Amino acid sequence: MLEHGLVLTGPELVPMVDADVAVEDGIIAAVGSPPAGWTPDERIEAAGKIVMPGLVNAHTHAAMTLFRGYGDDLPLQEWLSQRIWPAEAKLTAEHVYWGSLLAIVEMLRSGTTTFADMYFFMEEVARAVEEAGIRAVLARGLIGLDPAKTEKDLAAGVEFARAYRGAAGGRITTMLGPHAPYTCPDGFLREVVAAAAEEDLALHIHVSETRRENEEMRARTGKTPVAHLAELGVFSRPVLLAHGVWLEEGDIAVLARHRVGVAHCPGSNLKLASGIAPISALHKAGVTVGLGTDGAASNNNLDLFREVRLAALIHKVREEDATAIPAGLALRFATVGGAASLGLAEKIGQITPGFRADLIMLSLHRPHLVPGHDPISHLVYAAEGFADVTDVMVDGEFLLRDGRFTRLDEERIMREAERLGRSLVG
Amino acid sequence: MLEHGLVLTGPELVPMVDADVAVEDGIIAAVGSPPAGWTPDERIEAAGKIVMPGLVNAHTHAAMTLFRGYGDDLPLQEWLSQRIWPAEAKLTAEHVYWGSLLAIVEMLRSGTTTFADMYFFMEEVARAVEEAGIRAVLARGLIGLDPAKTEKDLAAGVEFARAYRGAAGGRITTMLGPHAPYTCPDGFLREVVAAAAEEDLALHIHVSETRRENEEMRARTGKTPVAHLAELGVFSRPVLLAHGVWLEEGDIAVLARHRVGVAHCPGSNLKLASGIAPISALHKAGVTVGLGTDGAASNNNLDLFREVRLAALIHKVREEDATAIPAGLALRFATVGGAASLGLAEKIGQITPGFRADLIMLSLHRPHLVPGHDPISHLVYAAEGFADVTDVMVDGEFLLRDGRFTRLDEERIMREAERLGRSLVG
């Protein structure tokens, strides 16, 4: 049981002072005071700390940590064709395993307890997740550009999703991951949708990330990417839509109607000069919004508190309105919003009895968090994941305790990632 | 002597591996290898660390740390009139002293070694600077709206600037601080310029922070704020111009011609929905650019690495160009750019023999800085001041050593700031 904390409770993150959180069998058993007659196994002091739901990183490519800092400040096409793709061609299962572990170290240290990943060698990502104790929603990336391969790829994607759904004691769920409308031809997308329907799977897909993507789709089909995907039946499945920078008004109505979750990735969208997604409009239309870091090659840091802060900052300028995306809303994007966008709304994202015990503690004893006028403001505008998160729990198990990993060998992971990162470049 | 570091040298921050930095009498004596025959008093291991110039925070109001998180997400006028101004009316010398110390703790911990401040009770700020060992450029804020007070205020500003120039063993320099064109009538500004000329002082002033400021100035004078200030002779003095969000093309030429330094404050400008300053155009025109946090009420964190990262991110979207403000340039804004904008170009901002030994060390042994493809990229896009800065030296003296303050009582400062912060609100 965590005792005497400043606990942010329920979907609205309502602060409750001097509150306890009782955890039993990986589940939040009670909030405020322990259940009558209940005896905790352990009492953990949370005075002077914020206790809040673990953050949900709704879109990343974990193993891309190995490319961190390899080719910044380049035009998108040059970055992809001369840096990322040649390096990705060298990727092996070993790279993905250790690169994913590095990402998990980074995410746990900065307060993320669940992440949605789309990449290759996904069995290795699943292995890393299983060992690390974190929660994840995994999809094999599917690219339909090479007709000789698409059928095999789709089969592999379905096979992975089937084999790993519910793995790691329920910590892993799976999706199908058609990469994007411009890398997946129409016929291929229809097959993916059919497979998803048959297997009862959701889809994780990049949509409207760049202005160019929208222009090319309009030239080809006369429609926006979202309108085109709607016509192909993609939204007949639950969808996690990454980026959505160039969504138009009509698109937003489609996403709201189909309960699509949007993974907003402000850091990546700024760094790649993609633009600023219309998040205020999405939120007003009732679309579920989560936050993602994207891969570390385009960010370059997986601390989701940075994305929370960017989400609270950049839309104020986009809308010329200092009240746009207030702090509490940005923080809900990263918790309940992320959980809902990943299909886990009933399970994680809030400190509420009956939810899985995925939670984090941050110390308020930091110069940049003094004076304590407003904890929500401090979390969004002043806190830093790496500096302030002290404890991380997933499914009731501490994975980080007083700044130390309980399961992971951080030193070895950094060493292997350094070696493997160097092997990919140059 | 610092040994075996990854040293970022000269104004261009050129990385030199396995390099030493020799310090003598507060001055950088040699970079690379020690001078022949020179014996250091102490050898400090810097292997696995970046050694770089301390950052220069070119615009802040240090004591506003006491208002951190007190009234976010409000429209600017409501924020000022209902929150900040009533709270500021309660400020005493004690508040400013402890609030400034809290700011200094935060700045040192995150790698800032010099800051430019404009506020009230500046003797208290100077006392805090003197005790803390940090470097500062101080100006009493001058507001000319009350005719009964202006003469006395100006005299006090001049008196402060005269009394404290060169104080704290040369660590303090001073300016005159006319707040802004919209709070300083024309006649008053002319008097300030005359006094600055007589005392050989530079000016620190807020200009074109909001669209409304520009519109009101145009309605009153038919000119932009910069054009109006030029007419009043303000640019006959060296000027540190804060914000500059709404600078126009003609303004930029004026600033370039008069060698004005612009303190770009991206975090504050986003949070208050002011806009994004035309920094690419300023840089191309040859204008000196520094970076500032502004006060902690509008930021809400004084880690200048955040501003470096924002500067490298937001202009990419503003210009729709992923190559805008590359990492190295953003970092130079925070070092040589800041130094030049504060009139200290010959003294600080680079690791070059003959410059004051104001430098910092960051550990590269962090998961978010692995693999080590590019140290400049890591500093700008991935590092965090609080998590990664381990050592801070000003004038050759360690103020932070292995994460511990040598002079300051951090616990007491946090305690006093908490108490005094609470006394201002509610």
Image (tube, coloured by chain):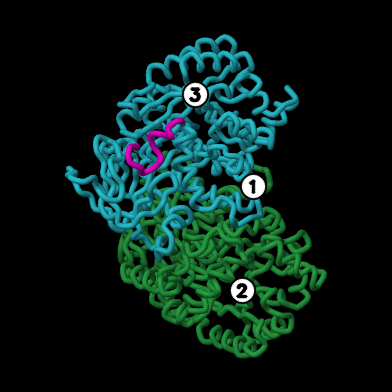
Chain colours: A cyan, B green
Chain where mark 2 sits: B
Identity of the amino acid at label 3?
Ala
According to the picture, the residue beneath numbered tag 2 turns out to be: B204
Please give the range of residues in magenta: A343-355
Between the residue at mark 1 and the residue at mark 2, the CA separation in whole angstroms equals 28 Å
According to the picture, the residue beneath numbered tag 3 turns out to be: A202
Residue B98: % across, % down: 40, 74
Label 2: few (<14), some (14–19) or many (≥20) C-alpha neighbours in 10 Å: many
Image-based side of A423 in relation to B311, left or right: left
Q: Nearer the viewer, mark 2 or mark 3?
A: 3
Q: Can residue A193 be seen in this view?
A: yes
Q: Which residue lies furthest to the front in this view?
A: A36
Same subunit, labels 1 and 2: the answer reads yes
Identity of the amino acid at label 1?
Ala
Locate the N terminus of chain B and report the quarter of the image it occupies: bottom left
Residue A398: % across, % down: 27, 41
Chain where mark 3 sits: A
Q: In this view, does A105 lie above or below A5?
A: above
Q: Do residues under tags 1 and 2 come within 8 Å of each other at their CB atoms?
A: no
According to the picture, the residue beneath numbered tag 1 turns out to be: B324
Identity of the amino acid at label 2?
His
* Mark sitting earlier along the chain (1/2): 2
